[in-house]
Amino acid sequence: MSLQQFRLTGSDGVTWVDLGPTSAPALSWSAPDDGTAIITGNADLWTTVAGYNQDIGITVSGPGFPSVSGQPESWKESGGNTGTFSPNAALVRASIPVTKGAAYGVKLQWKTNQPSPASVSIFAGAGVTGRFSPTRLTLLFVPNGSGYTEKISTQQYRTAGTDIGFRWVDMDPTGLSLTISPPRSCLALLSANVDLWTDTAGYNQDIAMVVVDDHTIYHSPDKFGWKESGGRSGSFSPKAAFLQTLYPMVAGVTYTVLLDWKPNRSLPNGSNIWAGAGPIGARFSQTRLDALLVCP
């Protein structure tokens, strides 16, 4: 964790560079067993010049990494297209398979979403000199067989201004759906991470997790867990939204967890809300849904 403020000037919009170069959060770690490393980065991102969004990514080194040379394992985009001096509390999450005894390095990198002149800077860290808002990098290790499951999509999703009003709809009922059968009664820690944005100012984006069990009980997101991402005064300005909640699961029941979304009010025809920023290459920023069982 760092309480410093970081600044990047004149990014070429393509090359990922370390958040530092000094004092930025970074981890060196050896896996105690075979399993999954769940890595999370969190930073207040902003710009002084409208039109330049801030991309933040998690870069991994070690056996098999980086999976694509010069690219992070996961990244998110934070909007500065129409606003300045407006920090967004961005969160990016990655998960990687790790091997017992292998050493890994993890760090945060960033860039602008397009080439920027030397007069343009982006920043990480909000507040006043001496104690800026924390920029954080964390790693949670989950051994194989410990009840962790995830779905990741690098597609881009769109909900158009048609007749859906502001009803909840599944974002991707196949690609973003988890099936969980707990071995005993457990708490499920459910998380979602997605870049949300609109092409028409004035329409926010709501995301939620819903649960259906094999007794066909539908658990409403209004009572379960949801978040709203702002598009009230800005378009084409992704927000790296994160939603997390606990849900009790009972042994002998199979649960399906879905990621739902909607606009905060009815969209007119020709207007859309979107999930997924970019692309970089052929891939948009990850939309993730994951669950970790915590069983007594």
Image (cartoon, rainbow, N blue to C red):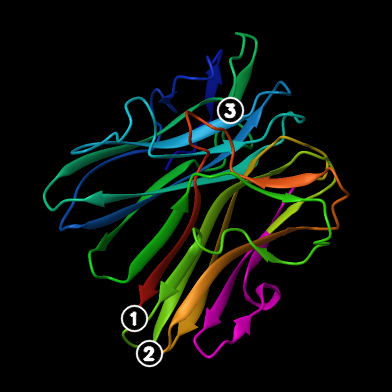
Residue found at the very far right of the displayed protein: 268
Task: Write down the region rendered in magenta.
Answer: 207-230
The N terminus, quarter of image? top left
Q: Would residue 159 be seen by someone viewing this image from the given angle? A: yes
Q: List x then y, in percent, for residue 259.
A: 58, 63
Q: Which residue is mark 2?
A: 251
- State yes or no: residue 51 in magenta: no
Please state which amino acid type lies under the numbered disc 2.
Answer: Ala
Which of the pair 173/225 is nearer the observer?
A: 173
Where residue 222 is drawn, which disc sits there? none
Specify which label sits upstream in the sequence, 3 or 2: 3
Cα distance in 3D space between marks 2 and 1: 10 Å
How packed is label 2: few (under 14 Cα within 10 Å), some, or many (20 or more)? few
- State yes or no: residue 226 in magenta: yes
Q: Secondary structure at mark 3?
A: strand
* Residue 60 occupies quadrant: top left
User: Residue at the spot x=38%, y=91% of the render?
Assistant: 252
Q: List x then y, in percent, for residue 41.
A: 45, 44
Residue found at the very far top of the displayed protein: 118
Name the mark nearer the viewer: 3 or 2.
2
Where residue 295 is drawn, which disc sits there? 1
Q: Which residue is mark 3?
A: 123
Q: Is residue 156 above or below residue 81?
A: below
Q: Is residue 254 above or below residue 123?
A: below
Please state which amino acid type lies under the numbered disc 3.
Answer: Phe
* Residue 294 occupies quadrant: bottom left
In this picture, residue 7 sits left or right of residue 188: right
Name the mark nearer the viewer: 2 or 1.
2
User: Residue at the spot x=69%, y=30% of the render?
Assistant: 80
In this picture, residue 271 sits left or right of residue 274: right
